[in-house]
Image (cartoon, rainbow, N blue to C red):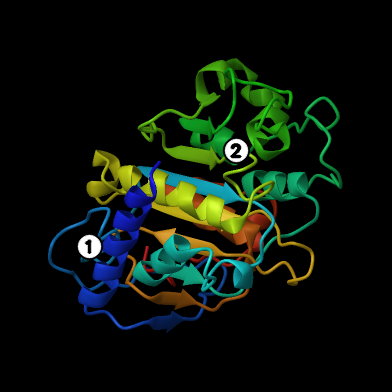
Amino acid sequence: MTRLRVTAGLLGLALLIAGCGSSGRSAGGPSPGSTARPTATAASGGVSADRPCGSAAAAPAHYDHVVWVVFENHGADAVIGATDAPYLTRLATACGQATDYHGVAHPSLPNYLAMTSGSTHGVTDDAGPASHPVDGPSLFSQAQDWRSLQDGMAKPCSSGNAGRYAVKHNPVQYYPGLAADCAARSVPMTSPPDLSARFTFVTPDLCHDMHDCDVRTGDDWLAGWLPAVLDAPQYRAGRTTIFVTFDEDEGDSGQRVPLLAIAPPVHSGTKVGVTADHYALLRTTEELLGLTPYLGQAATAPSLRAAFRL
């Protein structure tokens, strides 16, 4: 990826922010169980990589696709508004962000299990799948049609660390019930990415996710990867939501991490101030895809759907 490509992506988002005509809005959180969907104001020009949000007049009853992109180990203040994260900062302004969103544990693995199953299952370390097999349902088994795209993975369904691939960042490998579909659905990243599944979990590699490399490196990676997703037919059809988040903070930010919501109905500049965590992301995703029952602590977590106008 060249610096020119990144700059073009930033220019497009800057033009969107300047020309969309939407002022920043703050939204409180709905009560747990709320599924009301306020109507968004339509914007001219349709949806594109340069205008990812604010173009839909109303949210659909259910979405065809939800995509998560999960980065590593940075609090919200180290990313949103940071000079090393211009693309993420502009994306937050062009779409929506949760301003009081939190990881639930340290280190990484318990967060990945929590966000995909509603529980940490008592895990307090980053040991491999053989040490922590998790029986029972997950968001993957709920969705049935799922995909885990792993940047840096050498071969499908890899359960061991290799190069810049870390299995602790691929929660699929910890659910034995997914083994039959693992080789076909837990796969190396492709370009362009295949987003045809109902639920897609995206893990950048250990450098691109900011775990081993700096914030600028991860920001540049997203600036090169996301525009193709926003121009894909699934997103342009208006029935795809993308969430970008971080598993945990650096250990000194009270676990407040970024959460961005990207979808055509989201008003540009939306700020959701409800206190929420990874269980709320799980709950919201289950609502968007029409999945029940809500898993584990997602059942009592606040929904972010109405606040983001999804």
Q: Which residue corresponds to mark 1?
A: 56
Q: Position of residue 146 (x, y in %)?
A: 49, 32
Q: Which residue is mark 2?
A: 205
Amino acid type for the residue under numbered disc 2? Asp
Compared to residue 72, the image places residue 179 above or below, namely: above
Q: Is residue 15 toward the left or the right of residue 218 in the image?
A: left
Q: Residue at x 73, y 37 (%)?
A: 168
200, 32: nearer the viewer: 200
Q: Quadrant of residue 160?
A: top right
Q: Residue furthest left?
A: 44
From the viewer's side, name the closer residue of 26 and 255: 255
The answer to which of 121 and 79 lies nearer the viewer is 79
Quarter of the image where the C terminus is located: bottom left
The N terminus is located in which quarter?
top left
Q: What's the distance in space between the residues labelled 2 and 1, CA to CA? A: 33 Å
- Of circles 2 and 1, the one toward us is 2
**Among the two numbered marks 2 and 1 on one chain, the one whose residue lies closer to the N terminus:** 1
Residue 204 x/y as whole percent: 56, 41
Residue 55, given in percent of the width and then of the height, sits at: 22, 64
Question: Residue at the location (65% across, 33% down)?
Answer: 164
Graded by Cα atoms within 10 Å as few (under 14), some (14 to 19) or many (20 or more), the crowding at tag 2 reads many
Q: In the image, what residue type sits under mark 1?
A: Ala
Tag 2's secondary structure? loop
Please determine whether, in this image, residue 158 is positioned above or below residue 297.
above
Image check: 238 left or right of 69? left
